[in-house]
Image (spheres, rainbow, N blue to C red):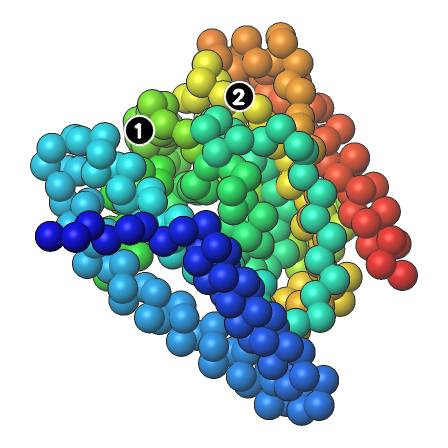
Amino acid sequence: MDEVAPPDRHSRSSIWIFVMAFIKKIDSFYEKLHDKLPVVGKAASFLTGVSVLTANSALVGLPVWTMGAAKVLTGSKLTDDALIAITKYWINTNNAVIDHALPHKDWRINLPDDLSEDKQYLLVSNHQSWVDTSIVQYISQDTLPLTRFFTKFNLIYIPVIGQAFYFLDFPMMRRHSKEAIAKNPALKGKDIEEAKRACALLKEKPFTLLNYLEGTRFTQEKHDKQDSPYQHLLKPRAGGLSLAINALGDELDSILDITIVYPDGAPDYDDLWKGNIRRLGVDVTRLTIPDDLFAAIMDGGYDRDEATKKMMFDWLEDIWQQKDARITKMLSEFD
């Protein structure tokens, strides 16, 4: 029987040229639609985004469940790698919609040149919108490991999404209320140990662990209520970051600081898929934690030593002052 020859280099080149030409036509279609019929253009982009998100989620749901169950039963690294690959496919497909169905973007993204998908990072961020996490996923493609963040254990009961968090080793915690801790202070220690156990699941793999240090989305009302000393930020909270450093510090390659600005105001989530976020600034820098602070946190000092807490807050205050000034500068560059 005659052997079938593999496609030659010329054939592969022709296919690539065809694909690129088709993508350019898609880009041009959405650009013209947004220019000539803005309302229709936004509706078309939104419908495309929602359709792809829905179809994409339905497509990966069964594979995630299958690989996740196999991982729980066998502990196999192969199933874990497959889960991460499926999740990256889901993210990258959504990112393709951002690239090609949302035209006229003035998105200015500044990243260090030496980031790697094979490293282990803590990532701290300001927080203004539900869009923030999608932006982190967008800028992370082919640059950072899969992003995870602390979640409540109750989310595990949300179909597909909750189980995906569990299978992908998102740190899921059973947190006790302030009232319960006041009645039984020992519960605070249990919460901390629970968080450390959750973080420990990440130790043997590349990860980006995202922490919104403000603990909530910025609004002017919250800013005024806090009497925040910063123009663009709420006061940072140190507990979650110190816990992550304590649990993962020996494994970390870097602590990164991402600053996200929306010159036209904090968007709602649907604004992303309508193409309403025309202007966006993202800046990622490395943070250097003082050696004495790192050693004190690794020794568990944050939870029992006021001097360590003061060092931590002083360090974060300096970072937040620099971030506040950076936000002012980034916004001015769009004027």
Name above or below for residue 242 compared with residue 272: above
Q: Secondary structure at mark 1?
A: loop
- Mark 2: give few (<14), some (14-19) or many (20+) Cα within 10 Å: some
Residue 201 numbered mark, or none: 1
| Quarter of the image with the C terminus in it | bottom right
Name above or below for residue 23 compared with residue 45: above
Point out residue 75 in the picture as x, y percentages from the top left corner: 16, 31
Residue farthest toward the front in the current orientation of the protein: 2
Q: Which residue is mark 2?
A: 253
Point out residue 124 in the picture as x, y percentages from the top left corner: 59, 37
Name above or below for residue 195 compared with residue 109: above
- Left or right, 147 with reference to 193: right
Of residue 256 and residue 10, the one placed in the foreground of this image is 10
Q: Which residue is depicted at the point 78% across and 36% down?
A: 321
**Quarter-wise, where is residue 158 in the image?**
bottom left
Instruction: Inspect the image, locate mark 1, and give the three-letter code of the amino acid beneath it.
Output: Leu
Point out residue 34 in the picture as x, y percentages from the top left corner: 67, 83
Q: Which residue is depicted at the point 47% across and 9% down?
A: 299
Is residue 215 at least partly visible in the picture? no
Residue 313 numbered mark, or none: none
Of residue 82 and residue 4, the one placed in the foreground of this image is 4
Is residue 34 at least partly visible in the picture? yes
Q: Which residue is depicted at the point 29% across and 37% down?
A: 81
Point out residue 309 in the picture as x, y percentages from the top left corner: 59, 21
- Left or right, 82 with reference to 284: left
CA gap between label 1 and label 2 equals 17 Å
